[in-house]
Amino acid sequence: PSGIGDSIPLDDPGLDIAAGEEFLQEVFQILLEEGVQKSTDVTQKVCEWKEPQELRELMDLELRSDGEGQERLLQRCRDVLRLSVRTGHPRFFNQLFSGLDHHALAGRFLTETLNTSPYTYEVAPVLVLMEEQVLAKLRELVGWSSGDGIFAPGGSMSNMLAMNVARFRRFPESRSRGNWDLPRLGLFASQESHYSILKGAALLGIGTDNVHLVRTDERGKMIPEELEKEIQRVKAEGSEPLFVCATSGTTVLGAFDPLDAIADICARHGLWLHVDAAWGGSALLSPQLRHLLAGIHRSDSVTWNPHKLLMVGLQCSAFLLRDSSGLLQRCHGVGASYLFQQDKFYDVSLDTGDKSPQCGRRADGLKLWILWKAVGTRGLGWRVERAFAATRYLLEQVKRREGFQLVMEPEFINLCFWFIPPSLQGQESSPEFWDKLGKVAPAIKEKMIRRGSMMVGYQPLGSRVNFFRQIITNPAVTRQDLDFFLDEIQELGWD
Ligand code: ABU
């Protein structure tokens, strides 16, 4: 209807650009001081715990009709940083990601500033070519001289893309007709595999009942003979096996499935082999550690998350494909006429966005590209080896110190252990021991968070009660931090 906005002048910009730039200058300073320097300063707290209601009030979260002044907004920026968890801190060990790399952060700033989607070359020329280069380099490390790939919003989505492409290759008509006339499909992954396989089965309409979790050995690795048995059993029940997900670096134990043996089984049954190397893929960068993934080149697809071990920053998940015939594009492409016009004046194969089920997509390759440029392949490999060395140091200390008990010798950099407080030491044979021990890690964790001294994850696994999982990905972590880590657990857990 006419009249709307008639009184709004259009001759001048509707934004105060000068004030905006001034604001940003101040924000950059705050980012540097509160976000970068304090986050990486070991004398600062890792977190400033507040109860949710207290935090809601402190942050004054309500959104109102009128805007606020610059000073108030700058204070809000400071508060966000001050009251958030410092994941870049050398004593943040809670997740598979941690640390702060200055070059990668610069890449994230660049990406945010450019604010574009690498779906077409015309709106993201530099970013499209960088993505092409980074994906090719990752594929080369997997052992493929050709292939395809795309960045996805996290490892779960990369795993789901693998499932979708596998189904499409076997049943191309499923794209248009859906699942209704497909046989009942069978998907296989180990008991220790990532939960995204179940989520993907639900999302893709395959059904979680059709995910068969294959038994693992005492180290958490898939047992190939059990996979073979499961495939036979599922076939005998009338289902059609389709897809096997092997894991290179399980989330909790850091176990690596035996890829060559699994690839043999997949080849025999004609199954798609996907390797979820979201966590362990970065070991390919180290000549000394890449043997952990021996056989990965025989897979059909790979998930690899450089945002984990390479400290690129969330999120950076590569979905890599051995196929170079355009399977990814045929599986996901619908050729929206307003983006992917075929009569453009440049090489339209660079309009890669239709390979993804997403439309708007973050340019997650840029930060990895700039980090890679900064430290080189050797520097990236060195970081993986340093993480390994730090884990070995901690392992030796855990073995020596009173009260610590390993869950198992780590194969990778997941160090899993219990802390047994004095009151439970020597009680191992009593029936209540494990029950009581299961309460120790949550209690210690609560104390460390309230103190703000450090953060580390814990979980139960199968029949094992809660234990700590220590992960060191951050090269800023020193021997002193590791000694502190153990001292702190001992102090907080002493009774
Ligand atoms: N699969 C995501 C890993 C979660 C974690 O950081 O432990």
Image: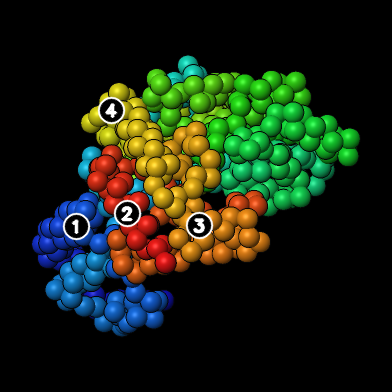
Specify the amino acid type for callout 2. Answer: Asp
Specify the amino acid type for callout 1. Answer: Thr
Location of mark 4 (residue): 379
Tags 1 and 3 in contact by the CB under 8 Å rule? Answer: no
Specify the amino acid type for callout 3. Answer: Gln
**Mark nearer the N terminus (2 vs 4):** 4
161 lies left or right of 493 = right
The CA span between labels 3 and 4 is 43 Å
Q: Residues within 10 Å of mark 2 (few under 14, many from 20)?
A: few
Specify the amino acid type for callout 4. Answer: Gly
Across and down, in percent, residue 356 comes to: 52, 41
- Residue at image x 71%, y 43%? 213
Tags 2 and 3 in contact by the CB under 8 Å rule? Answer: no
Tags 2 and 4 in contact by the CB under 8 Å rule? Answer: no
Question: Marks 3 and 4: which is nearer the front?
Answer: 3
Which of the two residues, 83 or 491, is positioned nearer the viewer here? 491
Mark 1 residue element: loop
Q: Which mark is residue 9?
A: none
Which of the two residues, 449 or 286, is positioned nearer the viewer here? 449
- Residue at image x 35%, y 48%? 98
Location of mark 1 (residue): 43
Location of mark 3 (residue): 425
**Mark nearer the N terminus (1 vs 3):** 1
193 lies left or right of 449 = right
Q: Which mark is residue 487?
A: 2
Mark 4 residue element: helix
The CA span between labels 2 and 1 is 16 Å
Across and down, in percent, residue 366 comes to: 32, 38
